[in-house]
Amino acid sequence: MGLVLGIESSCDETAAALVTSDRRILAQRIASQDDEHRPYGGVVPEIAARAHSERLTPLIAATLADAGLGLDAVDAIAATAGPGLIGGVMVGLVTAKALALAAHKPLIAINHLEGHALSPRLADPELQFPYLLLLVSGGHCQILMVEGVGRYRRLATTIDDALGEAFDKTAKILGLGYPGGPAVERLARAGNAKAVALPRPLLGTAEPHFSFAGLKSAVLRAKQTALHADADIAAAFQQAAIDCVIDRSRRALQSADMPTALVVAGGVAANQAMRRALEALAGEFGLPFVAPPLALCTDNAAMIAWAGIERLGQNDPLDCAARPRWPLDPDAAPARGAGVKA
Ligand code: AMP
Ligand code: MG
């Protein structure tokens, strides 16, 4: 049986976890930096990097203590090596390198997106390749065919904002605070989605790409007219976002070789209304719908440790680089109209 220590520090969560090859999470700790970033309404990279460097080492020690294990017990140390805010990634990766060197353990450098892409397999031993993955988080919005470990075909990406970013900006416009996604979802329950007309960017286009910048601007204009209740704007925004996600995912399912399942991952997968819509879409195609538990959807170290389990034996050198950008499918053609963020 394999045992991997996973380390995650690519955004505003400092996390460590111990995961076995038979899918047991022996211990995991996660320290959120929401309180540090809240005054700024978003993640401040420099503050994030400092917080990671203060917290990570004691957090790893506590995680090992929770499991009653020492570093000698692990088979490898897996750390997020990108993509993400580079200061935080460097803190996590350098910490992993130091531990690997001191304890004579192999280092496995993990692509954070691969952590998200494989996390459904940690939760569900039945899930087989290939599956269609909708990855929707604060920084990413992609549809991928997950064909195997290290084999990802990107079918779609966003040409501007990520979906989680659109939720966060909507929350900011409505004065709901940070992080915004859960607050928008809560307020939307009290609103009427039909009360405000909002656009559905790229709906119906042949390639299943996403765009949310125009929707965000429309939310701002709706708020500025002062004609609508905030709850109605939240409900209309959420419905427009869901309509886009469903249309784009349906397009991807129509164009792809049939996968074994429709899977959602990333922080926005916490949205219950979107989960229900995706489940219905999977049903249209006769596919199971797989959504990992919420704790595995948002940034966490168990998914990084699990990706390390999937990659056991594929060690990386101690001079491997931290990468601010690291596409899962380097061969994917850029989306037409995409800026540098794609
Ligand atoms: P991640 O980048 O994977 O850590 O996910 C964080 C992102 O998910 C943020 O942009 C949140 O606003 C978003 N998010 C979290 N919960 C929800 C929710 N219930 N509905 C919509 N977005 C959410
Ligand atoms: Mg993430």
Image (cartoon, rainbow, N blue to C red):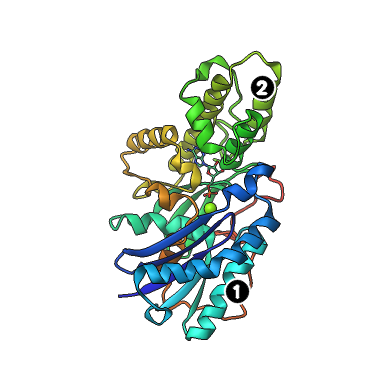
Q: Nearer the viewer, residue 118 or 5?
A: 5
Residue 27 against residue 259 in the figure, above or below: below
Q: Which mark is residue 223?
A: 2
Pointer 1 residue: 94
Q: Is residue 284 left or right of residue 103?
A: left
SS assignment at label 2:
helix
User: x, y (%) of residue 136?
Assistant: 52, 45
Mark 1 or mark 2, earlier in chain: 1
Mark 1 CB lies closer than 8 A to ligand 2? no
- Does residue 204 appear anywhere in the picture? yes
Residue 210 against residue 57 in the figure, above or below: above
Residue 263 against residue 241 in the figure, above or below: below
User: x, y (%) of residue 339?
Assistant: 71, 46
The amino acid type of the residue labelled 2 equals Lys
User: x, y (%) of residue 205?
Assistant: 57, 34
The amino acid type of the residue labelled 1 equals Val
Q: Nearer the viewer, residue 39 or 80?
A: 39
User: x, y (%) of residue 132?
Assistant: 42, 49
Going 52% across and 85% down the picture, which residue do you hit? Answer: 102
On-image quarter of the N terminus: bottom left
Going 39% across and 71% down the picture, which residue do you hit? Answer: 65
- How many residues crowd around disc 1 within 10 Å: few (fewer than 14), some, or many (20 or more)? some
Going 65% across and 45% down the picture, which residue do you hit? Answer: 42
Going 63% across and 28% down the picture, which residue do you hit? Answer: 174
Residue 92 found in image quarter? bottom right
